[in-house]
Image (spheres, helix red, strand yellow):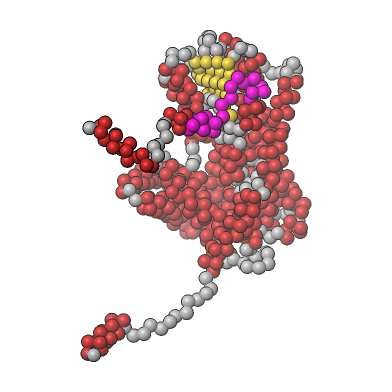
Amino acid sequence: MRVTELCHNWSRCIAGPPVQQVEMPHDTPLIATIVAGLGLAFVFGALAQRFRFPPLVGYLLAGVAVGPFTPGFVADQALATELAELGIILLMFGVGLHFSLKDLMSVRAIAVPGAIVQITVATLMGMALSWAMGWSIGGGLVFGLALSVASTVVLLRALQERRLMDTERGRIAVGWLIVEDLAMVLALVLIPAFASLQTGDVAAADPLAAQFGLGLTGVLLLTFAKIGVFMAVMLLVGRRLIPWILHYIAHTGSRELFRLAVLAIALGVAFGSTKLFGVSLALGAFFAGMMLGESPLSQRAAQESLPLRDAFAVLFFVSAGMLFDPASIIREPWPLLATLFIILFGKSLAAFLIVVAFRHPVSTALTISASLAQIGEFSFILAEIGGATNLLPKAGRDLILAGAIISIMLNPLMFAALDWLLPRLERRRADVAATPAPKPAEIPVTPLTEHTIVIGYGRVGRLVGEALQQRGHAFLAVETSEDILKQLKDAGIETITGNAARSNVLRATNPSAAHALVIAIPEAFEAGQIVEQARAANPALHIVARAHSDAEVEHLRSLGADMVIMGEREIARGMIEELDTRPPDPAPELAPQRAAENVQVQA
């Protein structure tokens, strides 16, 4: 009995006095905002995907659904804005991580001047529209810049779906996009300073400039000085420190710690750059990604950070949708139509004329035009900054958001029209082939005869070239990538620079005296042009091409290809051959006997 009482008293002493039940509050706006944002984004994104629209449209509509301008649940807009800031940091970190100076330099002759002129034209058109609506110069500038830049997500997805990433058209589009992104990064830094110039409030823009009496001009000078110091620190210290940290963590073998290091670098550099140098979170995150992109572990860093980047990017798009008032479409239909005209036709026409002026094919010009006929992430960021600095009126923000939603929905139709138009242009060009045309620049014709022509020296073309080298067959390669061309020249392989779909480039390969033509590029439209011209030059030429679908196979065969190889079929054939060469396993009841026989044989 005493033992029982002792145990009871001891347990009561250990447990302490009775704990009062505290009722947890049910008002959790942060959780409600995240759950509602991600949940509705999933529903609307799935519906958008079902109707063949980019999921980004669904995310924006989810924001409209939980915004203050629609009935029902209204998410906390202040919390949504803070979550959007995280989304901006991780979005810009991803942009910097995938920034490729090599891709830009390979198409710099067209991408740099083309993007600058297109941004200028679109910005001027946006400023003209804003002037007609009575806005300030600063508001018109922000509005025009927001209409001038295309969505990275939408453009890359459209190119990947049509397998254009490795083509000349795809490389120009990506390079063009890189220049646009760099221009917008600079704009994000300068807009707050420009806002201070317009309002005259130096202290609001930079207290340090106001303290030393530098005036409004001093704000700009100090802003550039801070950016310069920040870039110097990142290039001298961050360029070495950030990859070293990642390599050190990678050697620990902890995937969780590596993922945490990537996120800590992205968020830490962005936040530190704002507090120490006064630059924007977006610029800090962009430079963090760019410095990390120079590490051999950049691909792994991108993969590890992708889930969180996607989640917060979704919340960013949802928060952007919350700012949109659907009633503005009914209140101001004519400004919306003018905005859509600038996005879908104005800047696209400017891009088309620029590409044609640089003597690129019409197919390339049309692809660039269709790619740029939408706006997205940077437009939302500019709209938010414009609203925060009181440069952009609420009507301008509504027009940008409505223009983004509608243009992203219509962009697949632009590419569908492009797919319909290009074959007809090709046939028309064949019909008017007798019409005198400007003679393209002559390229010296190779002296090789009975040789093989390899078009495209990527993963497929390289394997073909190595096999031809081993067998001692003469061949030459046609390529556009400067890096690959340098490697080929260092290896002593004859090369021709340019797009083989152009008559002067293909003529330089001497197809009339060649033995075979291997078309290793993945784009069926350009491959079809090459097949048609090569067959006309040499009816006996053996032509082998690649395709990704049955329709592409039939298209290339109809133009004269002797053999068209589809990758999926060859993979299946290789698997079947492997199964045929391996004898079937013995029946389960014979397995022990087979194992015993193997042991006796080894003995």
Decide if residue 247 is on the left or right side of residue 189.
left
Of residues 133 and 415, the one nearer the viewer is: 415
Identified at 74% across, 24% down, the residue is 428
Q: Is there any visible trace of residue 315 in the rendered image?
A: yes
Which quarter shows the C terminus? top left
223 displayed left or right of 149: left
> Where is residue 20 drawn, in percent x and y?
41, 83
Q: Is residue 258 above or below residue 462?
A: below
- Is residue 546 rendered magenta in the image? no
131 relative to 35 in the view: left or right: right
Of residues 299 and 89, the one nearer the viewer is 299
Q: Is residue 446 visible?
A: no
Q: Is residue 562 above or below residue 370?
A: above
Between 474 and 209, which is closer to the camera in this rendering?
474
Describe residue 366's horizontal placement relative to residue 471 as left or right.
right
Which residue is located at x 64 percent, y 16 percent? 535
Residue 327 location in percent, x, y? Answer: 73, 60
Q: Quadrant of residue 165?
A: top right
Q: Position of residue 413 (x, y in %)?
A: 70, 42
Span of residues in magenta:
556-576
